[in-house]
Image: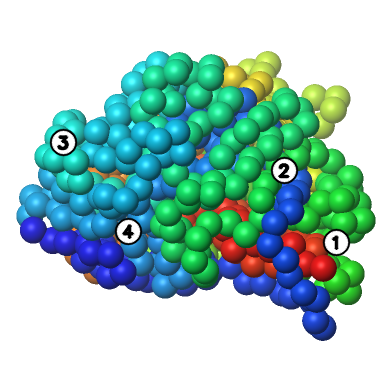
Amino acid sequence: MRSLRRALPVAVLASAALLASGCAAETDAPSGDAGGTSTGGTLVYATGDAEPTCLDPHVGGNYPQGLISTQYLEPLFGRDADGQIVPWLAESADVSDDGLTWTITLRDDISFTDGTPFDAEAVKANIEHLQDPDTASSTGYLSVKEVSDIEVVDETHVALHLESPKSSLLEVLSQQWSAMQSPAGIERGMEENCRAPIGTGPFIVESWTPQQSVTMTRNDDYVPTNPELDHDGGALVEALEWRFIPDAATRQAALASGEVNVIDNPLPTDIAAADAQGLTHIDAPRPAAANRIELNSSQAPFDDRDVREAFIRAADPSPGIETLFAGTATRSFSVLSSAEPFALSDEELFRTDVDEANDLLDAAGWTSRDDDGVRTKDGERLTVRFPVSTNQSTAAEQSLFEQIQANTAEVGFDVDLQPTDLSTWYGALAAHEYEAVSAPYTTVGPDVLRILYHSDGTIPAPSGYFANNAQLTDADLDQLLTDALATTDADERADLYTQAQRIVLDSFTVLPLYDQQNHFLTNGVEGVTTLHTISTPTFVNAALTD
């Protein structure tokens, strides 16, 4: 048996100690005395991410749910600043030599805010909830997909029996999308649980006014579990008001006036000016996958590798990234975040070469052009449908897509950018009504490669969402990713992930752009930190300043 114990690194995930490189949030605080602090009061957070349709992150599983649920739901495990997996609601974990059974020891002093005890039966109920097709889970479902049986050993011990080894299990159990919630809350039914999930966290969901805000109050009975906690007891502020303000300029104005204390998704120019305005900037890039454009290799025109390579040769995103993001984003040449030590970067592979792009399209048979300058073949235009979620893509990113649209038009592509809300965007992907898409995916660790590029990822989760937007189906790639999931040897894991990335990069199904951006600006508050798992903010240490 191999073990994890509280405050010790996970032995079975020896490579996890490397995962923190670049993961810890960097805070650029304004100079001068911030003034005194006080307990109590209401901290106001304004988000530009999409308003969730459900506050239970088990249902669906997008980043906006991860952001808000961090305040009221807690996971079994977390990750510290050094990238090591650490217990949270759990005390320890042991894995069998064959990797097929994980025995998790739980804390015995925790209850959900409705009084339901946190115990092995609660863990079983949560995993069953994630696996239930009626829950329509995606991210959380994938985290426990391999669990074939959940054995309640006793109140504080649960054994997870897997159908195949999963060395990343504790990593994915540290995510918000597999966080624990009250079984009694779940039993109320999806509609009621979506409105107000019940957790063990420092805050309690009190009310939700759609398209306006969610109100959360302090959990006065909070038992310290959050590894970020730097004081005795629970949160310092009495309440959180979580406002939905889609417009970045409106969010910034509310922050500057003191109406709001924290905002996410600030404009790059506002980040650059933060220090001069007396605001604090928190930079917390997300781990796992980089932001990227993926090309649908399952249907024309990108079922032809030459056409995919031509698009990449013509796209030329680097100048746009440099200017539009005002120095807050760095061009990536890897499918993995720079926070991941196994990331394989190949700048030469993604060089811009317009002449080569034209030659590739000619060789692929796209030799004619219509009156609009769009290439044609057998009467079909070289059209690329590109749905864009305006809830997930910032204004700078949408402008970058427009530049890529213009650049690729020079060689004869007709890129049809389709700005849309998040629900419609998901629908377009589910119906395969896209040839290109930028689909952010946040998890913990390099196993994201298996989620995104194993052929199993072309099969929809119960929510209808599938992660393999590139629609790659490669037997050699599948085997590498399966082997990487099974091994506990750090060097072997690194080698397997390197080989897998080479196959993905050489397929020209992915155009890397930059790390997934997570920027926050604060005013009138101190002690805001971010978790080292999926980089969501936590306000357990936050205090309003005078």
Q: How many marks?
A: 4
Mark drawn on residue 152: 3
Q: Are marks 3 and 2 in contact (CB under 8 Å)?
A: no
Residue 271: x percent and y percent?
Answer: 80, 64
Q: Tag 1's secondary structure?
A: helix
Q: Position of residue 256 (x, y in %)?
A: 89, 58
Left or right, 431 with respect to 280, comes to left
For label 2, the residue is 241
Residue at 40% over, 47% down:
75
> In the rendered structure, which disc, 3 or 1, sits on the residue that comes first in sequence?
3
Q: CA distance from mark 3 to mark 2?
A: 38 Å
Is residue 254 visible in the rendered image? The answer is yes
Q: In this rendering, which labeled residue sits more in front, label 4 or label 2?
A: 2
Drawn side of residue 165 relative to residue 276, left or right: left
Q: Nearer the viewer, mark 3 or mark 1?
A: 3
Foreground pick, 410 / 184? 184
**Quadrant including the C terminus:** bottom right
Secondary structure at numbered mark 4: strand
Q: Residue at x 9, y 52 (%)?
A: 96
Query: As shown in the figure, which amino acid type bears the numbered disc 4?
Result: Pro
Q: Crowdedness of circle 1 by 10 Å Cα count: few (<14), some, many (20+)? A: few
Q: Is residue 161 left or right of residue 445?
A: left
Question: What separation in Å lies between label 4 and label 1 (alpha carbons)?
Answer: 39 Å
x and y percent of residue 385 in the render? 67, 27
Q: Which residue is mark 4?
A: 87
Q: Residues within 10 Å of mark 2 (few under 14, many from 20)?
A: many
Mark carried by residue 269:
1
Image quarter of the N terminus: bottom left
| Residue type indicated by callout 3 | Val
Disc 3 secondary structure class: strand
The image shows residue 7, relative to residue 443, as above or below, that is below
